[in-house]
Structures are given as structure tokens and as C-alpha cells.
Image (cartoon, rainbow, N blue to C red):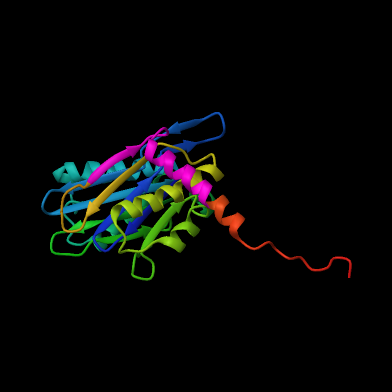
Amino acid sequence: MTYCAALKMDKHLIFMSDTRTNAGVDNISKFRKMFTWSTPGERVITLMTAGNLATTQAVVSLLDERSKAPEERDPTLLQVPTLFQAARLIADTLNEVVHAHADEGQDAEAAFRATLIMGGQIAGQEPRLFLIYPEGNFIEASAETPFFQIGETKYGRPIILRAFDPAMTVEQALRLLCVSFDSTLRANLSVGMPLDVHVYDADALKTGAQFRIEENDPSFSAISQGWGAALQSALEGLPEFAPPDLNS
């Protein structure tokens, strides 16, 4: 499984993804799930992937190869005029890979499914963020839905829903994501460290800060321990539940 999350903030886009893949308890590996294409001063596009590993690797490889081979450009991520067109190109590439490797029938195709998050900025346009579904359709982040998650989302989603504010600082947003990922890591062994991060500054038009949070990272450990202690303290501070008279 996988957990990836992206936040669309007032002045930034922040992406975070885990690196664990598994095909059973005896086959656990680490693979990068975050990829970036850029033309400094003109565009930056980041993609995160969840789902069948062979499918996602094929999609990324095709997008990458076609951006480097002039004869394959029709157009590529480095040529499309808008991020909407980039989302459509990625969705079409996903469909191409799924249909090329799947047998006939919906059930066969399901084994090759993948879900993607794509975001970035093209010169002269606002930063944008998209969620691309396995079927090839997609939606865009908005003021009402300013973040997207893919993979094992249910454990970390309530935390972001309750606390995310697009106006928060990068440091506050990273702390929020660390709590969201920590909750997921503790609840599901198929999501694992290290975590990859990309912080893109709006209008920079170049790749932003990219780094990896390792399992023994002191800041992540401090946030994890502090969150656990804060939850325990909050629970103890709540009024006790008064059950009905069970003997009546």
C-alpha cells in the first residue's frame, strides 16, 4: 500500500509520500513514489503515485522518455500549455499503460489500477493541484478541497481535515503532515518510512526544497512522541462518559 498527500496553500504546494511497497509479508521493498519534471523559469510539475507498482513505473517511464526524445513529443509534460492539459496527458498515459497490460474485462484491468496526484505551476498561471483517478478522469483542488490524498488515506485524513489552513506556514504544514503520516504508519504496516518531501514556492518556477525524512529523524520522532502525549493528555482532560443505568 501507499500513503501520499499534497497540500495547496496560499503561497506553496507541499507534497509528501511514503516509500514502502509490499506484495505480502515476505516481499516488502522501498520505491520512490514522487517524481518531478521542470524547466527552470518556465514550469515545475510534481507527480505522486499509488497503486500497482508496474503500472506507476511504466507511466512515469513513458512520461520521462517522451520528455527527452523529440520524436515522441506530441506534446510532453514539458510542452503542454496548461496544467489541465498536463493532467489530461498523464490520465491518457495511465489509460494507455493499463489497457496495454491488462487482459480483456474490467476485473482484469482492476489489478493494474493506479491513482495519481499531480501539481505544479507553469509561467503566467497559478499553481494547481489535481487528483487523477484510475479510470483516467480527474478533479482539481479548490478552496473547498485544498488537499488531496491517495493510497491508505483513512487514518491520516481526519487530522488534515480538522487542522489544515492554507494560510499556515510551511513549518506548520509539515508538522501537520508528519502527524498525519505518523498516524498512518502506526495503523498500517504497509505504509513505511522513509518519507519524501517536496516544498514548492508559488511563482518560483523551479524545483523547491526536496528532502527525505528517515526513520530515525529527530524532528519526526519528536512530533510523533509529542502527538501521542498530547492525545493522552486531551483524553484525560475530557469529561468521563456517563452510561445509562444498565439495571433499570
Q: Is residue 103 visible?
A: no
Q: Which residues are magenta?
A: 209-230
Picture layout, residue 65 above or below residue 7: above
Query: Residue sitting at 89 percent across and 66 percent down?
Result: 247
Q: Nearer the viewer, residue 59 or 226?
A: 226
Give residue 145's quadrant in the image: bottom left
Expressed as whole percent of the image width and height from the top left, the position of residue 203 reads 16, 58
Judge from the rendering whether residue 3 lies leftward or rightward of residue 82; answer left or right. right
Query: Residue sitting at 45 percent across and 49 percent down?
Result: 179
Q: Is residue 224 magenta?
A: yes
Picture layout, residue 210 above or below residue 124: above
Dividing the image into 4 quarters, which one contains the C terminus?
A: bottom right
Q: Is residue 165 visible?
A: yes
Q: Nearer the viewer, residue 239 or 132?
A: 239
Query: Residue sitting at 70 percent across and 63 percent down?
Result: 241
Picture layout, residue 171 above or below residue 139: above
Q: Is residue 145 magenta?
A: no
Residue ranking furthest to the left? 41
Expressed as whole percent of the image width and height from the top left, the position of residue 108 reads 52, 48
Q: Nearer the viewer, residue 84 or 29?
A: 29
Expressed as whole percent of the image width and height from the top left, the position of residue 134 reads 43, 55
